[in-house]
Image (spheres, grey):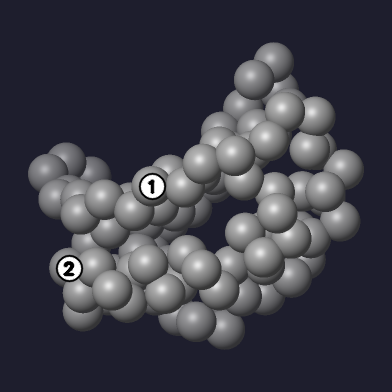
Amino acid sequence: MRFAVICRDKPGALELRLANRAAHLAYIEETGVVEMAGPFLDGGQMVGSLVILTTDSLEAANAWAAGDPYGKAGLFDSVAVIEWKKVIG
């Protein structure tokens, strides 16, 4: 099953994002469930994340989101994990 993890950064948290970026990218590599990912931008500045996961369940997707170093560092103002269906692409 695919899930979209939609995260919005806390206002003014770019430095926190940058400080934890290497750990976040390593987590993506290590877990092996990320199909695609990238930041949301506002005026070219990173302000959130969209991560598409392939996991067996919503619980597994939520566990992945809970383990993300960005989330553990307190970067996000909000996180939503929603089942997602790929139609095009």
The residue that disc 1 covers is 80
Is 26 placed left or right of 22 in the picture? left
Q: Where is residue 32 shown, x and y percent of the image?
A: 45, 80
- Work out whether residue 39 can be spotted: no
Is 17 or 78 nearer to us in this picture? Answer: 78
Is 17 or 25 nearer to us in this picture? Answer: 17
Q: CA distance from mark 2 to mark 1?
A: 16 Å
Q: Amino acid at mark 1?
A: Ala
The residue that disc 2 covers is 1
Tell me where residue 67 sits by quadrant. bottom right
Badge 2 density bin: few <14, some 14–19, many ≥20, Cα 10 Å: few
Q: Quadrant of the N terminus?
A: bottom left
Q: Amino acid at mark 2?
A: Met
Q: Is residue 45 above or below residue 52?
A: above
Q: Is residue 5 above or below residue 27?
A: above
Say which residue appears at 79% left-offset and 38% top-offset. 13
Say which residue appears at 34% left-offset and 69% top-offset. 61
Badge 1 density bin: few <14, some 14–19, many ≥20, Cα 10 Å: some
Is 3 placed left or right of 38 in the picture? left
Tell me where residue 58 sits by quadrant. bottom left
- Which is closer to the viewer, label 2 or label 1? 1
Q: Where is residue 85 shown, x and y percent of the image?
A: 14, 50
Number of on-image labels:
2
Q: Where is residue 24 shown, x and y percent of the image?
A: 67, 65
Is 5 placed left or right of 82 in the picture? right
